[in-house]
Image (cartoon, rainbow, N blue to C red):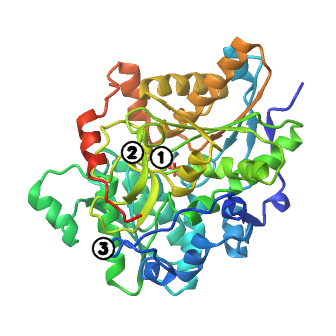
């Protein structure tokens, strides 16, 4: 009988994050200034981020040491467990072996504190007093509020208006950690007021909330901005997931033929996948790497690889990424963490280099997978994580058809305890699979900024 759960000792927790920029066969395209369209340097980012994080953003060192105060907080929940999904395998009747890394054991219930704690640490060390950020469903806001409270930082969170109104418990958690939460668009920024002037009942979007948080951070010296995904340093902080998983797969005497993760901005996917991709780039064993995204917001499978803004107000630098266009508003669906128009530049670049595959599924297919997972493995996944579960089940069913006993590893990036209203709607049969509007996508893509060659 093989074990179900693989646990590492605290002393086996990785001492460094893995920076995939060290192993890229082709470096990332430059980041451009939104005004001049010229490549930006570290100083251009200094109003928004502390220098240590800017240095990590552009670093090509393979390993970056995790500071001891960060490791000390990670120890509250790390190393995180890895499980073999025996009961799910049995229910599927697949010869495949399915493993999952579980990140829902963190205080916020997702992978996001892996970077929130690191970002709060470097900001506190640089003398920053206040952080601004955006949040959709609230997972990132919760994580930064938690991290800020441990390092004595004030945290101001712009929460997308619909979520602010619909998810009062997430807001209560953020406030419990001491953060201040505002519905976005708000009256506190020039950009927010301009959006409200046009449409007083605007439901908000992540792109708008980012514009508001960036605007406030740029104004005050004691205030910086924190982003929960997309940026290189954020993805790097998440690699502790894959580094731990590698050790745990060895304990299980197994190695993944396929690694699966869901993609919103790309951070939990990068966290599980980059250490495996890096191994292949250095000439080692190669796994297939599969990104799973929502069919209603398909940046990797339907977006264009192009320079674009990270926000709707067009204030952020331009990065080359798979994008649906910064003016594209995804239709509503429950995996709020996956409703972003772009994709991390590193994930996009690796897709272009043929290192990763991508697939897209509707939310009802993903909830169906999540319910089967709950009833066999006992953990109720976050709606975002259901996409990874669906991707893993698809691979397992392929193995069944082909009679192959491959090993599948996926990242269960969070639990769904704050998302039970979405499950209720699924059971009541009112979960609609909204389609994005093709003409709106075409318009958003036509509006992409033109960048001199
Ligand atoms: C935020 C979030 C995501 C999406 O963000 P990524 O950067 O793509 O990981 C996915 N799952 C959960 C549980 C989240 O909280």
How far apart are labels 3 and 2 at the CA level?
22 Å
In percent of width and height, residue 372 lies at 58, 21
In percent of width and height, residue 289 lies at 66, 39
Q: Which mark is residue 335?
A: none
| Up-down relation of residue 340 to residue 222 (above or below) | above
How far apart are labels 1 and 2 at the CA level?
7 Å
Q: Nearer the viewer, residue 94 or 450?
A: 450
Whether residue 143 can be seen here = yes
> In which quadrant is the N terminus drawn?
top right
At 49% from the left edge and 27% from the top edge, which residue is drawn? 366
At 23% from the left edge and 59% from the top edge, which residue is drawn? 185
Q: Which mark is residue 339?
A: 2
Whether pointer 1 and pointer 2 mark residues with C-beta atoms closer than 8 Å, the reply is yes
Which sits earlier in the primary sequence, circle 3 or circle 1? 3
At 74% from the left edge and 36% from the top edge, which residue is drawn? 83
Q: Secondary structure at mark 2?
A: loop
Which sits earlier in the primary sequence, circle 3 or circle 2? 3
Q: Does ligand 1 reach within 8 Å of label 1's beta carbon?
A: yes
In percent of width and height, residue 249 lies at 82, 41
For residue 156, which quarter of the picture? Answer: bottom left
In percent of width and height, residue 357 lies at 60, 37
Q: Which residue matches tag 3?
A: 215
Q: Which residue matches tag 1?
A: 264
| Up-down relation of residue 394 to residue 357 (above or below) | above
Q: Which residue in the rendered view is the most extreme toward the front? A: 453
For residue 116, which quarter of the picture? Answer: bottom right
């Amino acid at each position: 009988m093989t074990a179900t759960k693989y646990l590492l000792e605290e002393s086996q927790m990785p001492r460094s994050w893995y920076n995939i920029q060290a192993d890229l066969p082709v470096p990332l395209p430059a980041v451009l200034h939104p005004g001049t369209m010229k490549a930006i340097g570290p100083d251009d980012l200094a109003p928004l981020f502390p220098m240590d994080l800017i240095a990590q953003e552009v670093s090509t060192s393979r390993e970056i040491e995790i500071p001891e105060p960060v490791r000390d907080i990670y120890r509250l929940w790390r190393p995180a467990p890895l499980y073999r999904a025996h009961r799910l395998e049995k229910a599927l009747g697949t010869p495949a072996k399915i493993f999952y890394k579980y990140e829902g054991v963190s205080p916020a219930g997702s992978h996001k504190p892996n970077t929130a704690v690191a970002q709060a640490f470097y900001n506190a060390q640089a003398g920053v007093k206040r952080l601004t950020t955006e949040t959709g469903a609230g997972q990132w806001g919760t994580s930064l509020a938690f991290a800020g409270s441990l390092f004595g930082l004030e945290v101001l969170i712009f929460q997308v208006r619909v979520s602010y109104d619909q998810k009062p418990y997430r807001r209560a958690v953020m406030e419990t950690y001491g953060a201040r939460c505002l519905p976005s668009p708000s009256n506190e920024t020039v950009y927010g007021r301009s959006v409200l002037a046009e449409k007083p009942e605007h439901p908000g979007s992540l792109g708008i909330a980012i514009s508001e948080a960036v605007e406030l951070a740029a104004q005050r010296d004691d205030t910086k901005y924190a982003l929960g995904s997309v940026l290189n340093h954020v993805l790097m902080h998440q690699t502790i997931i894959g580094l731990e998983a590698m050790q745990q797969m060895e304990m299980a005497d197994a190695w993944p033929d396929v690694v699966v993760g869901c993609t919103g901005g790309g951070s939990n996917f990068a966290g599980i996948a980059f250490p495996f991709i890096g191994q292949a780039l250095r000439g080692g064993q190669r796994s297939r790497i599969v990104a799973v995204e929502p069919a209603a917001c398909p940046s990797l499978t339907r977006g264009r690889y192009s320079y674009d803004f990270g926000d709707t107000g067009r204030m952020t630098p331009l990065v080359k990424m798979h994008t649906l266009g910064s003016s594209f508003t995804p239709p509503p669906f429950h995996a709020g963490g996956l409703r972003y128009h772009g994709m991390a530049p590193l994930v996009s670049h690796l897709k272009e280099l043929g290192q990763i595959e991508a697939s897209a599924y509707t939310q009802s297919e993903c909830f169906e997978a999540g319910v089967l997972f709950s009833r066999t493995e006992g953990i109720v996944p976050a709606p975002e994580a259901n996409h990874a579960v669906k991707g893993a089940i698809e691979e397992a069913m392929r193995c069944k058809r082909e009679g192959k006993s491959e090993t599948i590893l996926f990242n269960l990036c969070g639990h769904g305890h704050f998302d039970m209203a979405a499950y209720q709607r699924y059971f009541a049969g009112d979960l609609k699979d909204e389609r994005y509007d093709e003409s709106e996508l075409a318009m958003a893509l036509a509006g992409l900024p033109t960048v001199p060659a």
